[in-house]
Amino acid sequence: MRTARSSLRSAVVVAASVAAVLALSSCAQEESVPASTSTSGDACADITTVKNGTLTVATSDPAYPPYVIDNKPSNGKGFESATAYAVAEEMGFADDQVEWTFANFGQLFAPGDKDFDFAINQISITPKRQEAVTFSDPYYEASNGVLVLKDSEFADVTSLAELQDAKIGVQIGTTALDEVETQIAPTQEIAVFDDTTQSTQALSNGQIDAIVTDLPTTLYLATVEVPGTVVGQLPAADAADSWGLVLEKDNQLVRCVNQAVDALTESGELLDITNQWMTEYSDAPVLS
Amino acid sequence: MTTTSDAEPVYDPARLQALSARRRRDATVSTISTILVLGLLLALIVNSPGWPAVRESFFSGVYARDVLPDILEGLRLTIILFVTAEPVVLIAGLALAVVRGLRAPVFTPLRILAIAYADVVRGIPTILLIFMFGFGIPALNLQGLPDDPLFWAWFALVVSYTAYVSEVLRAGLESVHPSQRAAARALGLNQYQSLRHVVVPQAFRRVTPPLLNDFISLQKDTALVAVVGAGIEMTRAAQIYSLDAFNFTPLVVAAFFYVLLTVPLSRWADWMAARQRRRSAAAGGAL
């Protein structure tokens, strides 16, 4: 049996080692925050990036058309890939100074240092999210489209009311869930999928009647993935669904990013990129 | 009541005093040690440079309150899923375990099938089984089969856990000494009766802890049904809010409820085991 002395000794040893760890960890100070940029007109004059001399951009894996083509954001093809390279150029980074990394949803807002400068992944700007991350100015205004199979009983609907009895599927983390609940108020529980791959499978199987997600995605799926038709788009909600680039909370780089996005918007270059990649995927009647 | 050797019926005041003094000292030391270690660990966490960000991201009181109704709604489906799955798993697992124990040559094909089932199913990740059943079977367009992903996801959980549980129960059945069965037969019980009244009850008691492991695991794996869009159980409810608000607190709240579901089960199993030990001891340690 252990004596009182030996248990006292082991308690002291444990306490001492914990104290040692504590002392060590408090030495590990937070990395120095980059000094705020100069107050001169150019917000990109003196910027700090994750990797010096390189702009690291994150997107999801897989990334889907029409935003990224062939799941290779580095090929410059697709709306978001092209937009990222245009923003980078405005910020002063040549194409070969842009590096891509993958970040899933959780990594975008996980606390701690990020391994990307900004993420581009059809992320809607919302007030709640702004408490956890910093958004750039919007680069796209999206609305939600309704995709059904061509031979579906819902293929000819023209109003939101006609969709009420449909089994509707959405992707998690999108604004579609909220909008379907408030605008359609379906009688059946909304199915929530991780990804378009799963919702498309469920649509093909007849397990859901309709997919509601961002309009370009529904139009892309209807032309490429399933024999479907986009019956229309939901009316824009009170606050328009704007997509922004996602930065670590309070990252001062956002001033330079915004300067770039605004310049692209004013020069019309952003519109050109949008037209080039999204025209095919942005037209559908508004359901009422 | 005199049960331990510490209290020999020799009356010795000095010895008793020394004993109680030692007990007091032990209690003091363990209290101080516990407070010190836990306190230092806590201090280590809350003094770390990233703690404010972590607290905001994982332990936000505002979000925890806000997500609670969604979590409770999801908890309902979580409970329905495992409460309906566990009895089926137990019965199917037992059937499989008994089949594997059949010795007669005529049962060889059944035995081979049971072995193949356990080997193959245990090798496949549960999430893949749920995809295969939830999306695959409805895609076959077979008449008469349901295409509800919730049913098939539930079924996949049952299929997966039956394989694990059958192995646990087989180990339990094999741990019952052959003499027990022989004694039962000698008393005039037939094959089924000796299994039902002698072997299975002993086997069950012995494997209660590993059985419980599997059921706790099943309770958490009910979260996997969401991958085929099969309903908003607790984890999915938390994820929805989490990705909407860019905050991990809902997942922590869900974890709290999962723990709440499993702790009573663990304590109950410990109590069962302790009772079993007492009874065995009372019976002269025969079992």
Image (spheres, coloured by chain):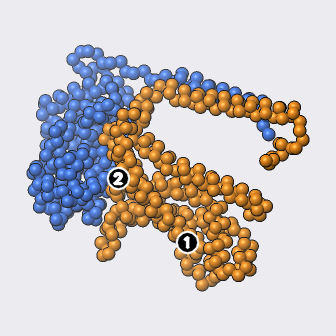
Q: In which chain is the residue bearing label 1?
A: B
A279 vs A237, nearest the viewer: A237
Residue A236 lies, in percent from the top left, at 15, 43
Q: Tell me, for residue B96, which label it has, or none.
A: 1
Mark with earlier residue (1, 2):
1
Residue at the spot 33% in from the left edge and 26% down from the top edge: A251
* Left or right of residue A131, residue B278 in this image: right
Q: Tell me, for residue B232, which label it has, or none.
A: 2
Tell me if residue A35 comes above or below residue B108 in the rendering. Answer: above
User: Which element carries disc 2, helix, strand or loop?
Assistant: loop
Residue at the spot 63% in from the left edge and 69% down from the top edge: B200
Q: Quadrant of the C terminus of chain B?
A: bottom right
User: Which element carries disc 1, helix, strand or loop?
Assistant: helix
Residue at far top of view = A39
Residue B2 lies, in percent from the top left, at 81, 47
Tell me the colour chain A is drawn in: blue
Pointer 2 local density, CA inside 10 Å: few below 14, some 14–19, many at least 20 = many
Tell me if residue B213 comes above or below residue A107 in the rendering. Answer: below
Residue B256 lies, in percent from the top left, at 47, 43
- Quadrant assignment, res B152: bottom left
Q: In the picture, which chain is orange?
A: B
Disc 2 residue type (three-letter) = Ile
Tell me if residue B265 comes above or below residue B98 in the rendering. Answer: above
Q: Closer to the observer: label 1 or label 2?
A: 2
Disc 1 residue type (three-letter) = Leu
Cα separation, mark 1 vs mark 2, equals: 32 Å
* Left or right of residue B172, residue B238 in this image: left
Residue B161 lies, in percent from the top left, at 50, 62
* Left or right of residue B206, residue B287 in this image: right
B192 vs A134, nearest the viewer: B192
Pointer 1 local density, CA inside 10 Å: few below 14, some 14–19, many at least 20 = many
Q: How many marks?
A: 2
